[in-house]
Amino acid sequence: TMLRSGCRRLGGWLHGAARARARGGRRGWASCIDPSVGLNEDQKEFQKVAFDFAAREMAPNMAEWDQKELFPVDAMRKAAQLGFGGVYVRTDVGGSGLSRLDTSVIFEALATGCTSTTAYISIHNMCVWMIDTFGNEEQRHRFCPPLCTMEKFASYCLTEPGSGSDAASLLTSAKRQGDHYILNGSKAFISGGGESDIYVVMCRTGGPGPKGISCVVVEKGTPGLSFGKKEKKVGWNSQPTRAVIFEDCAVPVANRIGNEGQGFIIAMKGLNGGRINVASCSLGAAHASVVLTRDYLSVRKQFGEPLANNQYLQFKLADMATRLVASRLIIRNAAVALQEEREDAVALCSMAKLFATDECFAICNQALQMHGGYGYLKDYAVQQYVRDSRVHQILEGKNCQSCSPEWFLIASSILLLVINLFRFSISF
């Protein structure tokens, strides 16, 4: 159908736009939302690879993966062959060694083909990065190579039934007995739960608060590790979500990542990149929705003429394009800040996640509305982008002001800036 094949044209549209630019021709509306603007030649090349893979391997299958709730292992391993299993992991353990901006570009392109699957790939990447960055050499070389090839899959285990945004209050305990930790507790809403081979788990080895939290790797098959039922979700159906349960689960001390008490720091540093990643996935969904809506308005006729001639709908499309470009700019700005380890990186990552996931969901939702009744049918891809992007406003820190770590991180960073400016003015 037009809507299902539309995603396959995204790559062609991009490169057709590039050809028009090379000829010096006008690209008009397309140039406004061109995702290759500002990228260097290397970035444009792997963006092309990601768009082509999304069009060839993901978009034709995303409806089936969604409706049958299939975890597309083979497709993800093909993505890993292109270097997407460890995008920002060091090369000596099989990673691609790319930057945070490079990673955002790749995940945006992949998400046009299947947002749900790309979101899982991004979580997997975050887990591998945490092991690569904070693990010792033995751990890096033991765990990372099979994760980078996606021979094995990884899940991030922080959220618990009683602690979501308040992650520092987690209760899963890890009592040391000789050369092992004995884990007891459970984790909730774990992407890949039951299917993943490696679980990067935050657990309490010390007293209350963030300083009592450590990070351990729990391998599938470990006695005492079990999983809850597969959750029935509105979207994200190509990745299973289950509770992960620990009942006297003995984990070798050799599987601890970093030092005791360092787990919360590791978790938060992982989430800085995770927020950019999930925002980039939202960006891909929104990008696809804008292009599909443009195509739909061009062929759908009402009152004897194409809907594309309706000025109200033209203005709506312009608003969607504006939100899309603004989201892309704030995400890429945060990605560069994180790569450069700037002191404002944490706040910028939170801003990017907060702004882009809200705006991109609004774009997808407006796209569905502009498709009319057809947008509500599962034969049309736009409804899947709506369902798959909605959860991005909840995970990696909820967007609502009442309990959001995003708002706290942004506000505290601004407050610190004001204090520093005040001190500077006094000293001056």
Image: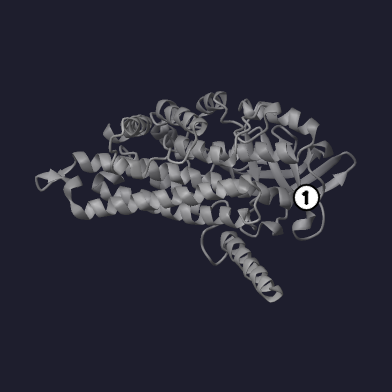
Is there any visible trace of residue 100 in the rendered image? yes
Q: Is residue 411 left or right of residue 260?
A: left
Relative to residue 10, is residue 198 drawn left or right?
A: right
Q: Amino acid at mark 1?
A: Gln
Q: Is residue 195 left or right of residue 134?
A: left
Residue drawn at (77%, 33%), measured in percent from left and top? 139
Residue placed farthest to the right in the image? Answer: 178
Q: Nearer the viewer, residue 356 or 209?
A: 356
Identify residue for label 1.
262
Q: Residue at x 80, y 39 (%)?
A: 250
Percent x, y of residue 17: 34, 34
Residue 40 lies, in percent from the top left, at 50, 35
Q: Quadrant of the C terminus?
A: bottom right
Tell me, yes or no, if residue 365 can be seen here: no
Secondary structure, mark 1, is loop
Q: Quadrant of residue 199?
A: top right
Q: Height in image: 30 above or below 137?
A: below
Residue 55, given in percent of the width and then of the height, sits at 40, 29
| Quarter of the N terminus within the rendering | top left
Quadrant assignment, res 33: top left
Q: x, y percentage for residue 87?
A: 59, 33
Tally of marks: 1
Q: Is residue 137 above or below residue 338?
A: above
